[in-house]
Image (cartoon, rainbow, N blue to C red):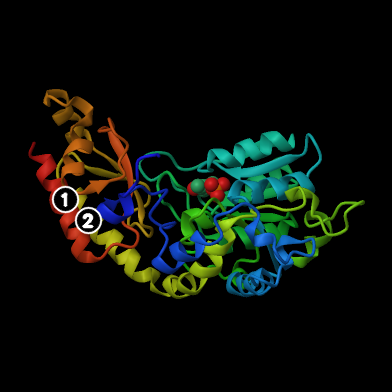
């Protein structure tokens, strides 16, 4: 049998990919009894998103309301949600306008859909900020079929004002896809204000979902016919998700995590305060700088750490010294061997845990 993994039980795990997808105990227990193949399909009448037992139909209606969208379906992940929109809206050779801070999966989805990519640039080091106003000029220049914005990027944890981009897209009459992989499920997303046509979500990243991977695609009903178009031969099967998407325990995980997700987004300000506190402490040390927006408004943060690199050059464990030292302290989630810069997340940790985390970094600075 594979070795047991106890990262979430035994460690403070600061891997940005993993902090918002951590499952609670109810979710874990519920997944267990749906672990067998196609177990969610016992009472399926042809559409996964309309199953009433377990009640996915009700869950997805509640999620549509929660996000301020008209309709929501499951996808296998955020990338599959983006691909579904790209592939149904665009013809081969059409242009799509994307922010430079995009996740690689946006590029890959666009490439597979056969579209031409144009970008809205960030302002470079050290903040790498995307200015929403730049979308206006770039839309005029590139005449895109679709605009994509990474609401919060995974490299710097910068938040872009999606309302402003939404307003520009409406003025210019271009469909707008908002990638909320690092925002929905963590903070309140109110699409009644943003006015995006499509919202892509990553539930294993930000909605406390385990038991596999899961995404959501929430849309404005104006695009229902195009994006949720069904097969000619199989009237209940949506083409862009090849009929059915996540037909396993991850959907059960969301059913069980959603009530707590709905509550936790209300406490986002606590997460932001904790992130700010942690950053201010870290950058008060010589040889540690923050990359990305400052003041920083998200738990994902990227430090440039020449000081740790200096230590690595002299240390017997070389670049691995930091990971090894933190491991001994019960901290994990930083890529082994990295000391020049690293990304981390403070999501879900108490101030006391973050004090311990900071003190451990202070000790590492003295190695
Ligand atoms: C993680 C991430 C994704 C990919 O999410 P999946 O659900 O795994 O497909 C997409 N976009 C951004 C910005 C991300 O950070």
Left or right side of 114 for 247: left
Label 2 Cα neighbours within 10 Å, binned few <14 / some 14-19 / many ≥20: some
Q: Which mark is residue 26?
A: none
Residue under label 1? 284
Choose between 132 and 270: the one closer to the eye: 270
Relative image position of residue 341 (x, y in whole percent): 29, 36
Quarter placement of the C terminus: top left
Location of residue 58 by image quarter: bottom right
Label 1 Cα neighbours within 10 Å, binned few <14 / some 14-19 / many ≥20: few
Relative image position of residue 325 (x, y in whole percent): 16, 39
Choose between 201 and 289: the one closer to the eye: 201
Look at 78% across and 48% down and name the residue there.
Answer: 88
Look at 72% across and 46% down and name the residue there.
Answer: 86
Residue 321 at least partly seen: yes
User: In the displayed structure, would residue 357 be above or below residue 125?
Assistant: below
Choose between 334 and 40: the one closer to the eye: 40
């Amino acid at each position: 049998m594979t070795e047991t993994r106890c990262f979430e039980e035994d460690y403070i795990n600061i891997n940005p990919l993993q902090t918002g997808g951590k499952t609670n105990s109810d979710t874990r227990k519920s997944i267990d009894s749906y672990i067998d193949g196609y177990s969610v399909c016992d009472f399926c009448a042809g559409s996964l998103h309309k199953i009433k037992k377990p009640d996915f139909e009700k869950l997805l209606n509640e999620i549509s309301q929660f996000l301020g969208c008209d309709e929501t379906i499951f996808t296998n992940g955020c990338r599959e949600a983006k691909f579904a929109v790209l592939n149904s809206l665009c013809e081969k050779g059409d242009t799509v306008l994307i922010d430079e801070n995009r996740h690689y999966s946006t590029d890959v989805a666009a490439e597979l859909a056969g579209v031409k990519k144009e970008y809205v640039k960030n302002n470079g080091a050290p903040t790498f900020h995307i200015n929403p106003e730049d979308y206006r000029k770039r839309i005029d220049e590139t005449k895109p079929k679709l605009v994509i914005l990474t609401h919060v990027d995974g490299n710097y944890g910068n938040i872009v004002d999606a309302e402003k981009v939404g307003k520009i897209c409406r003025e210019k009459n271009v469909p707008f896809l908002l990638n909320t992989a690092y925002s929905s499920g963590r903070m309140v997303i109110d699409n009644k204000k943003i006015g995006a046509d499509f919202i892509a979500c990553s539930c294993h990243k930000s909605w406390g979902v385990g038991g596999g991977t899961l995404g959501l695609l929430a849309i404005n009903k104006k695009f229902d016919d195009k994006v949720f178009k069904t097969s000619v031969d199989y009237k209940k099967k949506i083409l862009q998700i090849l009929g059915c998407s996540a037909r396993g325990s991850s959907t059960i995980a969301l059913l069980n995590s959603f009530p707590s997700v709905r509550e936790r987004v209300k406490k986002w300000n606590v997460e932001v305060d904790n992130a700010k506190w942690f950053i201010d402490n870290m950058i008060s040390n010589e040889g540690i700088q923050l990359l990305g927006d400052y003041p920083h408004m998200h738990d994902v943060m990227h430090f440039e750490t020449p000081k740790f690199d200096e230590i690595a050059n002299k240390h017997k464990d070389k670049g691995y010294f930091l990971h090894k030292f933190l491991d001994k302290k019960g901290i994990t989630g930083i890529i082994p061997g990295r000391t020049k810069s690293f990304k981390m997340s403070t999501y879900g940790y108490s101030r006391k845990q973050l004090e311990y985390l900071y003190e451990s970094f202070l000790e590492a600075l003295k190695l």
